[in-house]
């Protein structure tokens, strides 16, 4: 048995993935199916003396385990694949595998265990050189390619934090993050506190880990799945807090439309905007508050906008993507009716939020008459919902 097979047995974890149930009264979470991950990833590994051979073996096993259930490379008929490149660095960086080299998990294990079989004999490790080599792979093989709309991730494994001036990794990492590249860091070695504090300046917020974590594989897979979860251009990613960009993100994207129409026009317009798009749900006050914060500076006052609540066959239901049944409203969970509403639901079977002296709350209205702005919603692009390039440009 080769040593990588042993590690595979030892470390392989099965990642359960429960598909979202659209009839549940919850906002869709980001897809969490690691077997359908679609990303371009470069692992950037410090192989200076600060690492030990044992650490490097451990890293090879960690990377292999991360992708044990993922399609590696490219496939003619399956777009949901992940390409993995490998860069090692010390005072200089070496590209061990470009993004097209590994076409299977076997390739990954063979490549990793041969590239990470021993440390180099230098004590220097300039992370900036490793980052730069990863950036080079993206620039030449990812950006502008058929996978241009795939998200890009760098996973840094390092025992050291060195470099100033031109070799300062902080501004380079900041530039990468601003370009939409996610950075995951894993701190190795003894001096963990100072090192992990420094790596926090490199990593995407929440994506800084240490090798001693009991849940390292799950932590990194979680970060990869989060990186794979994004919205089409010009849609707002629904998250826990509008003001905190780093708050928990749902698998749902919102588009406020600043163009008054009737409730029915709004519903039709939302359905035709994108795959899986519909007039927005407000299952809870958090979503309501998020949307209100998003529109209150752009919509004219008094603010009014249609939402997906409507009266069908004697009950209030929430709009859903074309082809899915509407979801019955659960009034004991939360509702937001203006006192005295709903009024005469047969004649007033649509719902809008409208600004009164007290706030912005639900009012039922005729679906062909009242003209208001509206909010569309769609599923995020993620492991459960592949988006092709034309989806993303919308
Ligand atoms: C990320 O870095 C911050 C600051 O050093 C630290 O408080 C946090 O615990 C780190 N996260 C992990 C998972 O280690
Ligand atoms: C409605 O919400 C309440 C409170 O959250 C919950 O206990 C109940 O099970 C929900 N009803 C349905 C039909 O989902």
Image: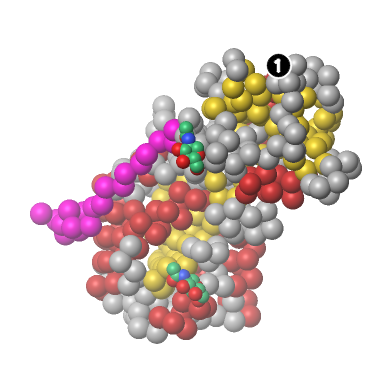
Q: Is residue 113 magenta?
A: no
Residue sitting at x 42%, y 54%? 222
On the question of residue 98 being in view, the answer is: no
Q: What element carries label 1?
A: loop
Residue with the mark numbered 1? 346
The image quadrant of residue 315 is top right
Q: Is residue 3 magenta?
A: yes
Q: Residues within 10 Å of mark 1 (few under 14, many from 20)?
A: few
* Quadrant of image for the N terminus: bottom left
Please state the horizontal and vertical placement of residue 72, each as a whole percent of the image.
36, 43
The image quadrant of residue 209 is bottom left
Please state the horizontal and vertical placement of residue 39, each as a whole percent of the image.
47, 45
Please state the horizontal and vertical placement of residue 155, each as a whole percent of the image.
45, 61
Query: Considering depth in this image, is 350 or 185 the residue closer to the camera?
Result: 350
Q: In this view, does 75 lie above or below 85?
A: above
Q: In this view, does 173 lie above or below 65?
A: below
Residue sitting at x 18%, y 58%? 10
Q: In this view, does 110 lie above or below 213?
A: above
The answer to whether the beta carbon of the residue marked 1 is less than 8 Å from any atom of ligand 2 is no
* The residue stretch that appears in magenta: 1-21
Residue sitting at x 44%, y 36%? 20
Q: In this view, does 301 lie to the left or right of 96?
A: right
On the question of residue 226 being in view, the answer is: yes
Query: Considering depth in this image, is 218 or 271 the residue closer to the camera?
Result: 271
Q: In this view, does 110 lie to the left or right of 289?
A: left
Residue sitting farthest toward the front: 340
Please state the horizontal and vertical placement of residue 272, each as a whole percent of the image.
67, 22
Residue sitting at x 42%, y 44%? 32
């Amino acid at each position: 048995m080769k040593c990588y097979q042993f590690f595979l047995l030892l470390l392989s974890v099965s990642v359960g993935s429960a598909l979202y149930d659209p009839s549940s009264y919850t906002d869709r979470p980001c897809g969490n199916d690691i077997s359908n991950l679609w990303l371009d990833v470069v692992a950037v590994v410090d192989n200076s003396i600060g690492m030990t051979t044992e650490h490097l073996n451990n890293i090879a096993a960690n990377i292999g385990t991360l992708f044990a259930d993922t399609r590696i490379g490219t496939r003619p008929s399956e777009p949901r694949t992940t390409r993995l490149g490998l860069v090692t660095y010390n005072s200089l960086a070496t590209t061990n595998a470009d993004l097209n080299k590994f076409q299977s998990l076997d390739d990954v294990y063979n490549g990793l265990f041969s590239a990470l079989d021993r440390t180099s004999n230098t004590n220097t490790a300039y992370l900036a050189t490793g980052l730069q080599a990863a950036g080079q792979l993206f620039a030449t093989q990812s950006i502008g390619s058929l996978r241009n709309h795939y998200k890009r991730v760098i996973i840094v494994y390092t025992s050291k934090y060195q470099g100033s001036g031109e070799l300062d990794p902080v501004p380079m990492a900041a530039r990468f993050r601003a370009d939409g590249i996610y950075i995951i860091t894993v701190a190795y070695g003894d001096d963990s506190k100072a090192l992990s504090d420094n790596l926090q300046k490199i990593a995407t917020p929440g994506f800084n880990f240490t090798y001693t974590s009991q849940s390292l594989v799950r932590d990194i897979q979680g970060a990869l799945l989060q990186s794979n979860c994004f919205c089409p251009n010009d849609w707002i990613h629904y998250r826990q807090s509008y003001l905190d960009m780093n708050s928990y993100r749902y698998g749902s994207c919102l588009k406020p439309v600043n163009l008054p129409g009737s409730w029915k026009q709004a519903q039709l317009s939302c359905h035709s905007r994108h795959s899986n798009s519909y007039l927005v749900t407000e299952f809870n006050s958090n979503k309501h508050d998020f949307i209100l914060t998003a529109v209150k500076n752009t919509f004219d006052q008094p603010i009014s906008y249609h939402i997906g609540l409507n009266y069908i066959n004697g009950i209030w239901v929430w709009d859903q993507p074309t082809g899915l049944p509407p979801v019955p409203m659960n009034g004991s969970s939360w509702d937001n009716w203006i006192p005295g509403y709903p009024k005469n639901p047969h004649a007033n079977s649509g719902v809008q939020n409208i600004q009164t002296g007290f706030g912005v709350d639900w009012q039922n209205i005729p679906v062909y008459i009242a003209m208001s702005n509206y909010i569309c919603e769609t599923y995020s692009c993620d492991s459960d919902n592949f988006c092709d390039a034309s989806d993303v440009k919308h």
